[in-house]
Image (cartoon, rainbow, N blue to C red):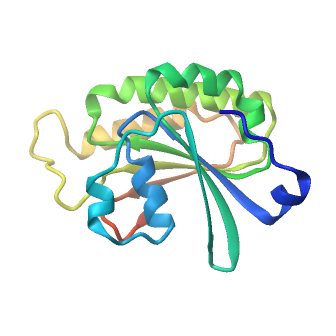
Amino acid sequence: MNIAMTEDTASNLKKVLLMGLDNSGKTSIVLCLMGVKNLSSFSSLNPTRGVKINKFQALGSEFSIWDFGGQEQFRDGYLNDFQTHIKGTKKFIYVLDIQDWKRYDISLEFLGRILDRLRKHKTTIEFSIFLHKYDIDLDLKDSKFDESVISDLIRNIKKLIPYGFAYHIYKTSIYTVFQKLAI
């Protein structure tokens, strides 16, 4: 989806892009940012196909949140049209589902490709990585998943980050009261 914004419209909006693999929780994060607290809204979500733009007002500002569906069939298209998508962006959030450890390599590869595009376009967008679904009921007893896995994941993310690139990594939860903890 290619959406152009006029200069007048763009100056009044805080444009935020959310990317990550499918089922990483991007749409749930958007709902939380919009102030949705109805649990049924979260249980009936369908996968985002393409790009869904959500505009709303909060904290005295107008936001335009671009939720990119993370299915494999869309990812190359986003990257091929990356310069158009990032135009006017104030914040970029990459969402990684930490409970989907079988797809860490795929998610890190996509993140690396995004970082490469940001570096090539010399953008100064505020960049965050959300280690999402980091929840109090997370089963760390699984022999394939424990805190050392998260530490390794964070180390691998940091290896992808270009020298001098400003970013933040947060642990975030799926619960409706959105919370992010700085790492």
Q: Residue at x 16, y 58 (%)?
A: 137
Q: Foreground: 107 or 21?
A: 21
Q: Residue at x 44, y 65 (%)?
A: 32
Left/right placement of residue 94 relative to residue 62 reads left
Q: Residue at x 71, y 26 (%)?
A: 81
Rendered view: 38 above or below 165 = below
Q: Foreground: 61 or 111?
A: 61
Horizontal and vertical percent position of residue 180: 43, 64
Horizontal and vertical percent position of residue 123: 79, 41
Q: Is residue 183 visible?
A: no
Rendered view: 160 above or below 24 = above
Q: Residue furthest bottom?
A: 60
Left/right placement of residue 77 relative to residue 108 reads right
Rendered view: 161 above or below 168 = above
Horizontal and vertical percent position of residue 57: 63, 72
Q: Residue at x 32, y 42 (%)?
A: 98
Left/right placement of residue 30 relative to residue 134 reads right
Quadrant for the N terminus in the image: top right
Left/right placement of residue 52 relative to residue 102 reads right
Horizontal and vertical percent position of residue 59: 63, 79
Toward which corner of the image does residue 121 lie, by quadrant? top right
Q: Foreground: 90 or 149?
A: 90
